[in-house]
Image (spheres, rainbow, N blue to C red):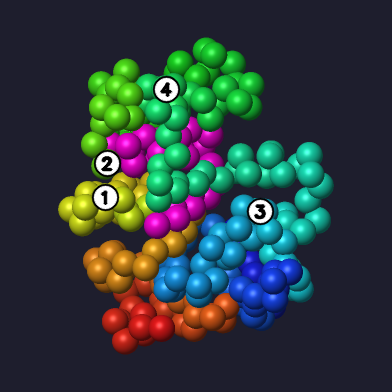
Amino acid sequence: MITFDHVSKTYPSGNHALDDLSLTIDKGEFVFVLGRSGAGKSTFLKMILREEVPTSGTVMVAGHDVAKLKKHEIPYFRRQMGVVFQDFRLIPTLTAYDNVAFAMRVTNVPEKKIKERVPYVLELVGLAGKGNSYPDELSGGEQQRVALARALVHTPQLIIADEPTGNIDPELSFEMMELLTAINSVGITVVVVTHEHELVHRFHQRVITIDHGHLYSDTPAGEFTRKEGIV
């Protein structure tokens, strides 16, 4: 699903964000990506989303060499994945239903299909009956679920969650991770970028730790320890 082969990234400022990073995430895996601020996590994500390309090395995502994608191919490439951001990025003037539907409308999906798919996905994330609510009428946890529903609406092969629990309390964080685990159980690859060690310890998944652009550790599911996570 995702392969980084000796990937380095140097920005025009001279910042070496990634340095000879090699790793593979297989289809259907659930992986935590750990690292403190400035470790290279954001650049790692941007490579997967084709917001950045490597200075050297190769990034393959879902069979695509991201550096070789033509500009008109990038939107179609990104539809194969769903992204959940820390700040939710909901449109405040749209209801929960329309926030999710918007992701389909911008890709010209027929309204009939939207009307079938959106209620199903809202129910899937525990928001049945909340479709007519606006973001400011929803709790932080509910807003995060809308963001997750939006990420799921295109039936993606891959879900990327960027600090998905940063704006919600610890109890809701665990609920969100349980939802992501359930999504992974049906074969969707899940990559969660986080700095929250407690979540990583609670959910016994593979853990990749990035430090100063390097692969610091790659720990199989169930074997992560606090010591390994300190970078």
Mark 4 or mark 3, earlier in chain: 3
Q: Is residue 111 above or below residue 151?
A: above
Q: What amino acid type is highlighted by mark number 4?
A: Leu
- Distance from disc 1 to disc 2, alpha carbons, whole Å, reads 6 Å
Name the quarter where the C terminus is drawn.
Answer: bottom left
Residues in magenta?
142-163
The answer to whether residue 119 is visible is no
Mark 3 or mark 2, earlier in chain: 3
In the picture as drawn, the residue positioned furthest to the front comes out as 13
The residue under the point 42% across, 79% down is: 219
Name the quarter where the N terminus is drawn.
Answer: bottom right
Q: What amino acid type is highlighted by mark number 2?
A: Gly
The residue under the point 47% across, 58% down is: 191
For the residues bearing labels 3 and 1, Cβ distance under 8 angstroms:
no
In the picture as drawn, the residue positioned furthest to the bottom comes out as 227
Q: Which residue is mark 4?
A: 94
